[in-house]
């Protein structure tokens, strides 16, 4: 039975059919060979679809392997496309995803985006430290951002749960002395629900069913404007978005990730201190900061 949703209907700046016809080829990189969930929206009615009925009457998972298939679902009212964090034939995880979601207070203050930029930058340092150098930041279309890294091999749930715990520990230990984090850190959730609980993530460039904003890749959270996620703007900036998505086309080896997760599980706290040192180095002294886009002046670390 499809689950009915209560939408906040916003008229898109461009017809979804035209939008997906332009961005669809890029999206297939993230949809192919994965189970797909689609939110269909016709008028003010929205329904979540996870299976499709075939000619023999059976219901099977939705798998979209071409732009033509994607457009077929768009014509039927599909507006929001989510892909599984593992391949269609697996129960493992091959997309490492950390959520950074901001509450109302953070989104309403001038420095809220600065704090999320800082936290996302820290999460990316952690990704890099454990070997996930091919990663990207994606606006989720509503109230937060995701750091995403594709994995060369699948990892089980418990290992990824330990990785999420490691990320939280390092972020909190690294940020606790920052006034900005002390003031507003409680209004930001850093977690792995997308990867571990929902097990599906909004495909980059897909429209959010409620806000009608696109899930766009970002060079820096600090520079984010809602305008950039407007569908018409996404089309105009398509080559920029394509370039920002390129790291997600290269899969990361998992040996270093597994090794560091095992160290964490075995209570090796030197790991936390090493990563914390790398983070402070990036923020305070500017080592490779151009790569991560950390704004030292505006972060006010002193």
Image: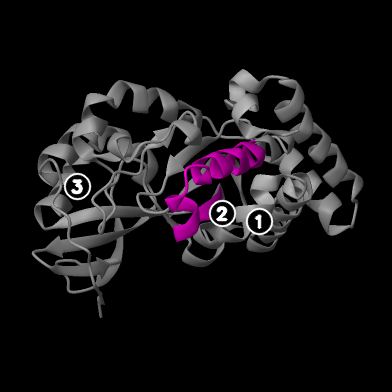
Residue at which label 1 appears: 160
Labels 1, 2: front one? 1
Q: Are marks 1 and 2 in contact (CB under 8 Å)?
A: yes
Gap in angstroms between the C-alphas marked 3 and 1: 32 Å
Disc 3 and disc 1 in contact, CB within 8 angstroms: no
Q: Secondary structure at mark 3?
A: helix
Mark 2 falls on what kind of element?
strand
| CA distance separating discs 1 and 2 | 8 Å
Question: Which label was assigned to residue 69?
Answer: 3
Place residue 6 in its image quadrant. bottom left
Distance in Å between CA atoms under marks 3 and 2: 25 Å
Q: In the image, which is nearer the foreground, mark 3 or mark 1? A: 1
- Colour basis: one colour
State the residue in front, 126 or 280.
280
Please give the range of residues in magenta: 97-124
* Sequence order check, earlier mark of 3 and 2: 3
Q: Main secondary structure of the magenta part?
A: helix
> Disc 3 vs disc 2: Cβ atoms closer than 8 Å?
no
């Amino acid at each position: 039975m499809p689950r009915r949703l209560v939408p906040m209907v916003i008229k898109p700046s461009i017809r979804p059919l035209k939008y997906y016809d332009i961005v669809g080829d890029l999206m297939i990189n993230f949809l192919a060979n994965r189970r797909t969930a689609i939110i269909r929206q016709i008028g003010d009615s929205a329904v979540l679809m996870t299976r499709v009925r075939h000619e023999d009457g059976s219901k099977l998972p939705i798998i979209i392997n071409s732009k033509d298939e994607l457009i077929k679902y768009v014509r039927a009212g599909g507006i929001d496309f989510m892909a599984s964090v593992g391949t269609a034939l697996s129960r493992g995880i091959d997309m490492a995803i950390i959520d950074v979601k901001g509450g109302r207070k953070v989104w309403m203050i001038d420095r809220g985006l600065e704090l999320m930029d800082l936290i996302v930058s820290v999460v990316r340092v952690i990704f890099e430290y454990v070997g996930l150098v091919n990663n990207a930041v994606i606006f989720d279309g509503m109230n937060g951002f995701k750091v995403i890294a594709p994995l060369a091999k699948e990892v089980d749930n418990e290992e990824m749960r330990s990785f999420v715990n490691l990320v939280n520990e390092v972020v909190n230990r690294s940020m606790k002395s920052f006034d900005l984090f002390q003031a507003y850190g409680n209004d930001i959730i850093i977690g792995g629900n997308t990867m571990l609980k929902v097990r599906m993530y909004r495909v980059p460039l897909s429209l959010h069913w409620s806000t009608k904003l696109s899930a766009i890749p970002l060079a820096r959270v600090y520079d984010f404007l809602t305008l950039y996620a407007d569908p018409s703007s996404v089309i105009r900036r398509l080559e920029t978005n394509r370039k920002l998505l390129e790291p997600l086309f290269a899969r990361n080896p998992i040996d270093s990730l597994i090794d560091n997760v095992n160290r964490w599980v075995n209570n090796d706290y030197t790991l936390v201190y090493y990563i914390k040192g790398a983070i402070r180095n990036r923020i305070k002294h500017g080592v490779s900061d151009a790569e991560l886009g950390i704004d030292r002046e505006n972060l006010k670390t002193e």
